[in-house]
């Protein structure tokens, strides 16, 4: 007898989602307890936190199917991998470009040097785009094995595309909330409520783009690359390369209104494309 004898495809998907959410809650709670007890929300502790959804997904697969197949391990499409790589540049450049041109913030390539241990700015930028991308992909992959490797395609087995997007967005937001409300993962210079509002809009917009690219590619890799590229380009390049002014935190970064708008546009365009393809 297999673990799923007598289950329909929909029933198996339900079982996987329940197991995944339960395991994710346990593992993420343990990771957060470690972070808050140690008072360290940098480096290894954050990397471990980001890998908890991936570990939960792998355990779910082993429990329900005795295999880790079905998480979208094959890359499949080069075009969507390329889109995932450049999309964050497309939606971030207008926000930061207008911030620099308007004087709300200042272009500051010396910030790249600080990120790369004192190297010259251009050399530091090169290091960020190569080794920094690999490091970003390694951590983002942990989340994406869970969110888009397992959760999104399993939700699609038994609910509408709209509900799939909403549920995965809420789960992804809840994953970040302890760091926002109890840690230092929010903007400096703006009220916490504003950071939370903008980040919520960003998460729902990103979830639309992530769900589309996962379902369109039948692979987790474009979503993982999009997540990694977003973290690197927004945080490691544009945030690091901007000297903030009094107003710029309200516009730039993951907790500013600018990216909430531009990612919202990108997510809407991709989501509408996915809906047309499903018709």
Image: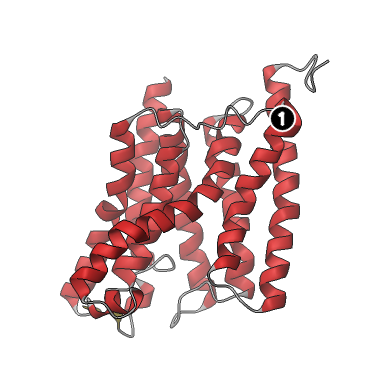
Q: Is residue 136 above or below residue 222?
A: below
- Viewer-proximal residue, 277 or 46? 46
- Quadrant location of the N terminus? top right
Lateral position of residue 4 relative to residue 276, left or right:
right
Q: Residue furthest right?
A: 1
Question: Is 62 on the left or on the right of 171, as rendered?
Answer: right
Q: Quadrant of the C terminus?
A: top left
Q: In which quarter of the view is residue 21 placed? A: top right
Judged from this view, the residue extending furthest toward the left is 101
In the rendered image, the residue lying farthest to the bottom is 246
Choose between 130 and 227: the one closer to the eye.
130
Residue shown at the point (60%, 69%) measured from the top left: 179
The residue identified by callout 1 is 14
Q: Is residue 217 above or below residue 259?
A: above
53 vs 188: above or below = above
How many residues crowd around disc 1 within 10 Å: few (fewer than 14), some, or many (20 or more)? some
x then y, percent, for residue 114: 32, 79
Residue 108 appears in the figure = no
Q: x, y percentage for residue 193?
A: 54, 73
Residue 274 visible, this orientation? yes
User: Residue 177 appears at what percent x and percent y?
Assistant: 61, 64
Helix, strand, or loop for circle 1? helix
Expressed as whole percent of the image width and height from the top left, the position of residue 248 reads 32, 77
Q: Residue at x 45, y 45 (%)?
A: 224
Question: Which residue: 32% across, 60% down?
Answer: 233
Residue 257 image-quadrant placement: bottom left
Please name whichever residue, 17 or 189, is drawn nearer the observer in this view of the structure: 17
Residue toward you, 208 or 5: 5
């Amino acid at each position: 007898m297999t673990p799923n004898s007598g289950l329909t495809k929909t029933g198996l998907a339900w079982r996987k989602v329940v197991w995944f959410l339960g395991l994710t809650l346990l593992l993420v709670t343990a990771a957060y307890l470690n972070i808050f007890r140690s008072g360290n929300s940098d480096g290894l502790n954050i990397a471990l936190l980001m890998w908890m959804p991936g570990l939960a997904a792998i355990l779910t697969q082993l429990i329900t199917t005795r295999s880790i197949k079905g998480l979208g391990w094959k890359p499949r499409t080069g075009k969507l991998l390329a889109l995932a790589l450049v999309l964050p540049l497309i939606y971030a450049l207008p926000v930061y470009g207008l911030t620099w041109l308007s004087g709300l913030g200042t272009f500051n390539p010396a910030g790249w040097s600080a990120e790369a241990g004192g190297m010259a700015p251009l050399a530091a930028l090169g290091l960020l785009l190569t080794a920094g991308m690999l490091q970003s992909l390694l951590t983002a992959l942990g989340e994406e094995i869970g969110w888009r490797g397992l959760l999104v395609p399993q939700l699609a087995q038994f609910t509408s595309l709209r509900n799939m997007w909403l549920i995965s967005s809420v789960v992804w937001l809840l994953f970040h909330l302890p760091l926002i409300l109890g840690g230092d993962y929010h903007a400096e210079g703006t009220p916490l409520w504003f950071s939370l509002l903008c980040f919520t809009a960003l998460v729902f917009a990103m979830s639309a783009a992530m769900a589309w690219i996962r379902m369109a590619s039948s692979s987790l890799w474009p979503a993982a690359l999009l997540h990694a590229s977003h973290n690197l380009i927004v945080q490691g390049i544009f945030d690091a390369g901007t000297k903030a002014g009094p107003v710029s935190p309200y516009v730039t970064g993951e907790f500013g209104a600018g990216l909430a708008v531009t990612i919202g546009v990108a997510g809407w365009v991709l989501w509408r494309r996915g809906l047309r393809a499903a018709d």
